[in-house]
Image (cartoon, rainbow, N blue to C red):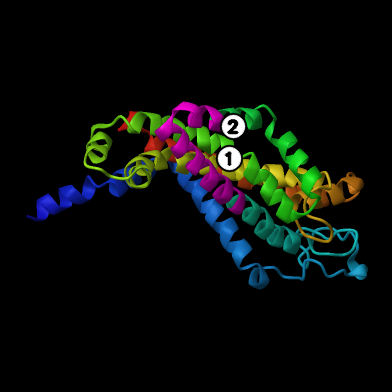
Amino acid sequence: MSATVADNRISSPVAEFWRRFRRKRVALVAGFIILLIALAAIAAPLVAPYDPSAPDYDNVLADPSALHPFGTDAYGRDILSRVIWGGRISLSVGVISVLVGGAVGIVLGLVSGFFGGWVDSLIMRFCDVLFAFPGLLLAIGVVAVLGPGISNVIWATSVFSVPAFARLVRGDALALKRAVYVQAARSIGVRPVTLMLRHILPGALPGVIVNGSLRLGNNILTAASLSFLGLGAQPPSPEWGAMLADGRSYLGVADWLTLWPGVAIFVTVLAFNLLGDGLRDALSQKLR
């Protein structure tokens, strides 16, 4: 009996996923780094040594030291504290935009793939229009219409996340709606909404999870780019892209102003990309 229970436990989907994922050492390290960044952002009031917006004119452009490990900026604000608080903004933008864009894209993809016909054509042409614009250019256009600000950056990054999720889910829906178990459920009168949510969506979730993890890094980078251009977070908000924009005037004089927010962006985006690669390998149907 115990051997049977152990075999069932090992063969469960979650155990099978973890068995494959834990072999991806790089992805595990990336996930641990993301966890540390997220914990530091959540606990920013406790972890950050200084108020990120409080000026200290006695320590203007101070070199990195024991009191200020990352140095200070032109107003004497501690760079380490601003980087930690900036993680809150960047991670919030990435997570919220992926959730919003993913939710809309999943609905559009399910409806498009399940019903087909003119509904599919209409939704896919809408996605083609969004795909015709580079992501950053589309985000700039949305922010130009809505106005600068971090909330509008979230909407902008959400908009260009929609077509990627829609296309992905549509492809899975087209394949899964012809599966035997879906046809059997349809033959006994199961409603279309139930078919999409209970029978088709679970089969599309692995691809959604992988795309979402990769999209997180991309959205964080886009949000930082918009803030660098002055269209995102506004001063004195400690957002990583805005910090890069503030520090570019002091290159060669106080390089730490751009070094540390740049490192934060690089490490975070790279970690999400590596995590996404590991999730893709662990969840890939072709490897099962």
| Quadrant in the picture for the N terminus | bottom left
Residue 122 or residue 162, whichever sits in front: 122
Q: Which residues are magenta?
A: 96-123
Residue at the far bottom in the pictured view: 46
The vertical placement of 137 against 262, above or below, is above
Residue marked by disc 1: 162
| Quadrant in the picture for the C terminus | top left
In this rendering, would 272 be left or right of 19?
Answer: right
Look at label 1 and name its amino acid: Val
Q: Position of residue 129 (x, y in %)?
A: 65, 29
Residue 187 or residue 228, whichever sits in front: 187
- Kindly identify the residue that appears in the image at 53 percent across and 41 percent down: 105
In this rendering, would 71 be left or right of 211?
Answer: right
Look at label 2 and name its amino acid: Cys
Pointers 2 and 1 in contact (CB under 8 A)?
yes
- Kindly identify the residue that appears in the image at 73 percent across and 51 percent down: 152
Residue marked by disc 2: 127
Residue 288 or residue 76, whichever sits in front: 288
Q: Position of residue 186 (x, y in %)?
A: 27, 38
